[in-house]
């Protein structure tokens, strides 16, 4: 029998309709259009067992609060591109709800063209170690002394490298 140790539960919101100013054309900046958002989220605990066991909202991902956050970001943003709108919503959800992962779909019906423009993205929350830049090293390990590293660096730099350095 297969093990179920790697089970990951998701919490989803489907077809959230949000009136918002969105678009690049002048006429779009003067009206509200309805954006439709669906999102799948992995809760921080990666399962819903704790919430199910306690039957307490404090142990669950509050999907009503998620929906309110999505609507607020879209209404307040007045974005020109749906790509930007989708990124900002994803960033906010990852940060505010401490989600390890989400998949977000943002739809903009184009009534005059008879189609729907859709952006779908998946994002994972960066861990602090992933956000920290690590310096580029020419040598691995600790066997090379600081003086040797300095000498090796100077030998490998040409005139065009002078004054260049690692910026962070």
Image: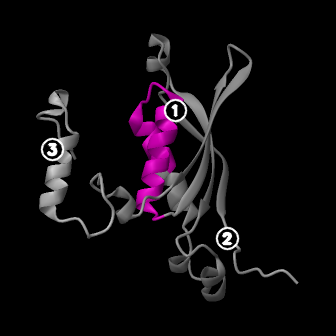
Mark 1 or mark 3: name the one nearer the start of the chain: 1
- Residue, x 14% and y 51% (percent of image)? 151
Q: Quadrant of residue 51?
A: bottom right
Q: Quadrant of residue 162?
A: top left
Per the rendered image, the range of residues in magenta is 70-98
Disc number placed over residue 83 in the picture, else none: 1
Disc number placed over residue 8 in the picture, else none: 2
What kind of element bears circle 3? Answer: helix
What kind of element bears circle 1? Answer: helix
* Residue 53 vertical placement versus 37 (above, below): below
* Residue 40 vertical placement versus 115 (above, below): below
**Mark 1 → mark 3, Cα distance in angstroms:** 44 Å
* Residue 167 vertical placement versus 57 (above, below): above
What kind of element bears circle 2? Answer: loop
Label 2: how many residues lie within 10 Å, few (<14), some (14-19) or many (20+)? few
- Residue, x 15% and y 28% (percent of image)? 159
- Residue, x 88% and y 84% (percent of image)? 1
Mark 1 or mark 2: name the one nearer the start of the chain: 2
Q: Nearer the viewer, residue 11 or 9?
A: 9
């Amino acid at each position: 029998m297969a093990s179920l140790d790697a089970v990951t539960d998701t919490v989803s919101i489907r077809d959230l309709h949000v009136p918002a100013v969105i678009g690049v054309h002048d006429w779009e900046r003067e009206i509200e259009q309805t954006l439709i958002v669906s999102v799948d989220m992995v809760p921080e605990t990666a399962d819903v067992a704790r919430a199910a066991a306690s039957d307490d909202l404090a142990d669950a991902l509050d999907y009503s609060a998620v929906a309110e956050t999505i609507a607020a970001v879209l209404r307040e943003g007045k974005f020109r591109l749906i790509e930007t709108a989708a990124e900002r919503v994803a960033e906010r959800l990852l940060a505010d709800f401490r989600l390890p992962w989400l998949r977000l779909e943002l739809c903009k019906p184009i009534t005059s063209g008879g189609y729907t423009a859709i952006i779908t993205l998946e994002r994972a929350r960066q861990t602090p170690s992933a956000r920290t830049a690590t310096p580029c090293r020419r040598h691995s390990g600790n066997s090379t002394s600081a003086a040797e590293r300095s000498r090796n660096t100077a030998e490998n730099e040409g005139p065009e490298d002078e004054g260049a350095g690692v910026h962070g």
